[in-house]
Each structure stands twice: as structure tokens, then as C-alpha cells.
Amino acid sequence: MKIHYAEMTNHLGSSAVRDILKVTQGKDIISLAGGLPAEELFPLEAVRDAYDRALAGSASSLQYGLTEGYAPLREAVAARLGRQGISVQAGDMLLTTGSQQAIDLFCKVLLNPGDKVLVEAPTYLAALQVLNSYRADIVTVDNDEEGMLPEHLEEQLKLHRPKVLYAVPTFNNPSGSSWSRERRERTVELCRRYNVLILEDNPYGEIAFDEAPGAYPPAMAAIDRSSGEEPCVVYTGTFSKIVAPALRTGWITGPSELIGVIAKAKQAADLHSSAIDQRALYELLQHFDIEAHIRIISREYHSRMKLLAGELSTARWKAASFREPRGGMFLWLELPSGINTSRLLPYAVEQGVAFVPGEVFYAANPLKNAMRLNFTHTPPELLPAAVRRLEAALENYERTLARAADTLV
Amino acid sequence: MKIHYAEMTNHLGSSAVRDILKVTQGKDIISLAGGLPAEELFPLEAVRDAYDRALAGSASSLQYGLTEGYAPLREAVAARLGRQGISVQAGDMLLTTGSQQAIDLFCKVLLNPGDKVLVEAPTYLAALQVLNSYRADIVTVDNDEEGMLPEHLEEQLKLHRPKVLYAVPTFNNPSGSSWSRERRERTVELCRRYNVLILEDNPYGEIAFDEAPGAYPPAMAAIDRSSGEEPCVVYTGTFSKIVAPALRTGWITGPSELIGVIAKAKQAADLHSSAIDQRALYELLQHFDIEAHIRIISREYHSRMKLLAGELSTARWKAASFREPRGGMFLWLELPSGINTSRLLPYAVEQGVAFVPGEVFYAANPLKNAMRLNFTHTPPELLPAAVRRLEAALENYERTLARAADTLV
């Protein structure tokens, strides 16, 4: 039979990242494409103990739970955020199926088709997909490595009267860059002045390479909440990167009224997320030193990033450029302007290496000559080989380009 | 700051069931309101073992998984459905966060505002909420205890050209009734003729009180798939009632193309549901006799239903009427037409008993004098007291009605 879909399905792109992952699965390919944490660092035994504890009590742990999530875990997350300078009430927080669901529900209750949303460029691919699925009108704000440019931000605020600003200001996916304190402050100030909600998406903030106190600016949510005014920053985070993704547990916190509306939307969407996973995470936080664990993974990721950066700093790469990220999971590599990384990708896969072409991370006017490289999932001993394969792919690709140019002459 | 919500939030009712549950929580109230299974029958130790096994292998069990869900569990669910006469491929199935998410995603990818959807009356409250959130135009088809009336169904199909028909044809929530084989066949036939997708929601079908082989008609999905034509029935089920709700694992199966589109929508909504819960359920199915467990809970629920039905068959209740459900979790009680069960509810809560007023289960023209009674969650020894409290509430309510009538005279 002929199925007639909703209009929204015309705006549901599949994720290029996932399509690439599908192609590369099970083959002899070193993939720097996925946004995956290192499996060998997952605290498997501690997680196993945590589930055992979570299921050691009464059978009521298996019953339906609250839409907002398991209250002790909300309290524990609120307490952790408090120690990070973000003062929130557990009652103003909702637990979600990963922070992806937080982004989706936030957009669902706020955006009508045609509503304007400001984003940085490049930005998180799956957030662009959610925004497109609600048929938002996505508007890019110019930025440099310090964050959005305040003058352009104010211009766009005046011109477009957007409803929402979405950003990943700390160890951005894909660019790896982090906003300065001043840019964070200016963004909060401007958005408050123009009555625009900010969704600060911070899945990577705790994967910080510099351990010196005060090495990083505070979250925009912390700046916002220290102002004494009503919050305009909605903040989402996740256990996916600091514990493990399979538990699918994230959170969203913001103005009480908004969280109440999101809870109603979540009730219709799935009643609640897995209560067992939430209980297990609560037990994990009680019996496992998660702060020490985060230091361990951050140090290891730092060392892998350094290794990758070193491999990309040889003479062969002198025409390319990148900045070392100060945390997170990605390195953003810009090649000479003549190189189209989407066209380069099949050459790379042929050589046995994968990356994500930069252009997928833009709502408009993509940079065609950049790529996102993940340095956390690939075992470090394979990183040099990955870069050698990338070099071979580049050589083949450039040779083809040169041949095509010859033909034109 | 002033938050401007999306239009959809004007169509997001909160669940009356949940609001009542909130009022009754932690008080000395016997609640027949919630749709909760019996906690004391949850296979807690087997579930605990299952998580232990799920986490005994490699750390890759904690990594991101496929949007469609853990493949071995999909295979196992497809095999169980096959044994129930519903022949499906695991590849045409998606695992969801409970069957609630299956209903939500199905509606999300199919319904534009104003699209017509056919439902029975009464029907599942949270499905009405989802339909309203997508601003569907909900149209009721007349039914009796055997199911939708084919003549009226055809009339509505011709008149409204609906996109979707939603039904809970087996042990309906809230009515407890089940459609006959003939009505199932006619409904599938008519919907196929008018190119309308059926969403058959079957969370209760396995909670069957009659153990004789062939005691029940097949699922509409089974009838549909045995026709040799392209399927028009999309089928959703869940582990919430046969294992436990906290694992939040349901499934949806239907035409490949539709499942592919739903997978894209799910990817944007939450990437995937908890992979650990899915692995644990797979382990549970391997090492625990779930069929024997389902017989145990079905027998216990049957005996509780009989007990409740007995308490409601005394002389005091001769003006009320109900049919004994042949499975599921609910008994639908109709009181004399002068009694408004929404107005009765506060009297009941005062007496220490709760139920769900029937009117919330209708899209339009609600029956005002009915109530949904859950017989699975309350310990059987409390059921007689619950009915005595209901009797006291009715007496108080009727006395007040009589006084009001006196005043009018």
C-alpha cells in the first residue's frame, strides 16, 4: 500500500556519520569518523556492580517511574552541577534518553515551523537534524575560535528575532574549539536582552586536558545563574562520555516552567526513560570515584590527541592547519582550499581510513576542505597508520585532480 | 523571561491518571487507578542475573548501539511473534523506549495537523494525548463488545479518508474487551481497501486468562500477514507487562519502508534506547522461562479479577454493570447514568480509594458514568476493602446529589 508520510519526514536527513559507520563496519578500516569514546576505558566492572546494587533492593525498582526520572539521581546530578558552579534545583531537571532526547524535546516544545534558531558554524550534526525535523529556519552567527562574534550576534538577533540559540561552547563537536569567558558573557547578556533562550549543549565539558584550577571559563549556564536574574540558559549534559553511552542517560535543566512543559512532552513521547539505568547510575555515583575516572580518561584522550597532532605536524601536512583542542573528542583539520573532503572520503575508505567531511556540520555555506577527526576511539598504536593511510588517500586524490586538470588543458 | 512555546504545547494535556497517582501517592489510599502490574510478581532475581550476564562480556556492550536496537533481541522478539502467528522479519522491527515511544514515533512520521485518525471508544488515554500533540483530527468509530462496527467503520472511512486507524483490540485499556475474529478480519479488509494503516497496540495480549488452545482470535497483524498481501497492520508490543516496566523496552514492526522512516525519526529523537536493557532482556529470554512466568502472572491476575468481580456482584451493585475481561489488567464498570464518576472521584479519595473516571478515555462524547478499575496492582487481600470504600463514597455522593435535588425542589 502507498504510505503518505507527514511533512516532517521530508526534513529528516539520515546522519552521514551513521551512513559512513555502516560502510566501515566489520572491514579493515581505521575509523576516525565516529564520535565514540574508548571502549577499553569503560568502567565495566563498576557498572556491573552498580546494576547489581540497583537490583538488590525491592522489586519496586522494576515498576513504572516518574516521567522526570529517578529522584535520587536528579539530586546527585544537581549536586555535581553545583560543584561545577551551576546552581540548579533537582526539581528543575529532567532525565532524558541521552542528551539527544533533551535537544529533541526542547525543540519540540518551542519551535513552530519557520521559527528562527541561531547556531554557530560548524555545529553538532544531530542538532541540525533535529532543528530541520521541526522545520526551524536555521541562521548562522559568524564566529572565530573564541566563540560567536558579539557584533554579528546582535545583528542577527535584531534582524531575525530568533526564538532560540543553540551552541556547544566547550570542546565543540566538530571543531574542538572552546568559547572564551568574555564571549560567553556577551552571548548570555545579548540573548537575555533580546529574550532568546540559549540551549547550551555540554556533553564534552568534563573531558578537559588542562588540570590547572581555573584553566577554563565557566559554562554559560553558570554565568547565567550567577546573575541573579531569571535563567535564560537551558543546559544539557550526559553520562555518555564520562561513564558510557549505552546507558542512554542525559539531563536537561532550565526555567521550572519550561521543564514542566518538557515533562508533559516526554510523558507523551515515552512515559519515562529506563529507570534501571538511572538507578544504576545513582549507585555508580555512590560507590565509584567518577571524578578520578574522568581524570583517567581525560589524560588518555589528551595523550591520543597529542599523538594525532604530532602525526599531522610533519612536512607532508604543512599545507594543512588545525588547532590542538583543549578537551573533548575531536580535532578539526583544514586542508588547502582546493581539496573537497567529501570527494576525498572514498579515496580514504579505499586506503582503509575514515573521517567525517566537514561540510555536514553546516546549516549553510559549508567549508568544503575540512574534516572531523575523532582521536578517542581508535587505539593509539593505530593512529600513525591512520595518518599514513590518509596521506596515501590524499596523494591518489590529488593525482586524480591533476589528471582532470590536464584533460581540461 | 517570557517563553513562547510551540503550538503543539496547547494540545499537550497532562495525564489525568498521573495527576491522580500524584495525589494518591504515599497516602493510605488503595489505588485501583494506575495501570501498574503487580510488583511482587516481577522476576527480580532473574532480571538481576540477566543484567549480570549482559555486562559479563566485553566492554563494547557499553558503547553506542544501532538506532534499530540490539540485533539479537530483535531476532528473539521476531521469533516469539512468529510462534504467536505473526510472521515478521527482525529487519522490519525497531526497539523503542516502551510501546509508548512506538506510538509516538509512528504518529510523528505519519500525521500532519488535521489528518484524520480513527479510534474506538473508549481507548488508551496516552494514545489520545499523542494524537492530540500532533494535532490529529480524531474520529470515533462506533463499537460494541466485539469490536468496531464494520458498517460504521466503512462509513467513516469513506467520509473522512483517514490516514490511520489506532486500536487496542485485545483486552483493551480501559474497557477490558476483546474484538472477535470476524471484526478483526473485517477491519483489516476494510482498511486495506481504503489504504489506511492500522496501528495495533497490543501490550496486554499475552495476559490471557483462558489457557485452552484457540481460546482467542489471532492478532490483526497475524490476519494481515497471512493474507499474502503487503502488510497494512503495524504492530506494537512491550515487555512492560510480561517482564517489568522499568526496562522500558517495546517494539514496533510493519512495512520495511515505514520502519526505515521511523528509524530516522528515532535517530533524531534519542539515537537509540538503552542498549543495556535490551541486552539484559535478551539474556533473560535465553535463561528464564518467560512463557511459564506469563502463565503465573496471568493466573494470579485472573484470580484477582475474579475476586474484584465477585465484590462487585453483591446486591449493593445491582444497578451497576460490567463484563468480566478475558485478560489484561482492567475492569470497566458502568454505574447508573445519573452518576458522574469524575465528580465521584473526590468522594472516593476521601474514603481512601482511587479509580480513573471513564470520561478521560474518549476523544469526544464521553460516557460520564463509567470507571476503569485496575485489578493487578493492589494486593488481593485489599480488594474487598477497596470495594467497601467505593460503596461508602457512592453513598456519600448520592446523599449529596439527593440533598442538591431537594434544594432544587
Image (cartoon, coloured by chain):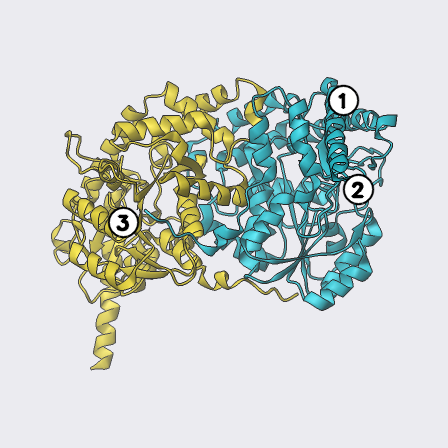
Chain colours: A cyan, B yellow
Contact, mark 3 vs mark 1 (Cβ under 8 Å): no
Task: Tell me the residue that label 1 is attached to.
Answer: A388
Query: Is B305 on the left-hand or right-hand side of A174?
Result: left
Does residue B347 appear in this view?
no
> A389 or B286: which is nearer to us?
A389
Of labels 1 and 2, earlier in sequence is 2
C-alpha separation, residue under disc 2 versus residue under disc 3: 69 Å
Task: Tell me the residue that label 2 is attached to.
Answer: A337
Secondary structure under the numbered disc 2 in the rendered image: loop
Q: Mark 1 packing: few (<14 Cα in 10 Å), some, or many (20+)?
A: some
Does residue A340 appear in this view?
yes
C-alpha separation, residue under disc 3 versus residue under disc 1: 68 Å
Q: Mark 3 packing: few (<14 Cα in 10 Å), some, or many (20+)?
A: many
Q: Mark 2 packing: few (<14 Cα in 10 Å), some, or many (20+)?
A: few
Query: Tag 2: residue type?
Result: Ser
Q: Height in image: B292 above or below A281? A: above
Asked if badges 2 and 3 are on one and the same chain, I answer no
Contact, mark 1 vs mark 2 (Cβ under 8 Å): no
Residue B158 spot, x, y in % from top left: 24, 61
Q: Chain of mark 3?
A: B
Contact, mark 2 vs mark 3 (Cβ under 8 Å): no
Asked if badges 1 and 2 are on one and the same chain, I answer yes
Residue B136 spot, x, y in % from top left: 39, 60
Q: Chain of mark 1?
A: A
Secondary structure under the numbered disc 3 in the rendered image: strand
Q: Image quarter for residue A162?
A: bottom right
* Disc number for residue B373: 3
> B289 or B179: which is nearer to us?
B179
C-alpha separation, residue under disc 1 versus residue under disc 2: 21 Å
Q: Height in image: A197 above or below B238? A: below
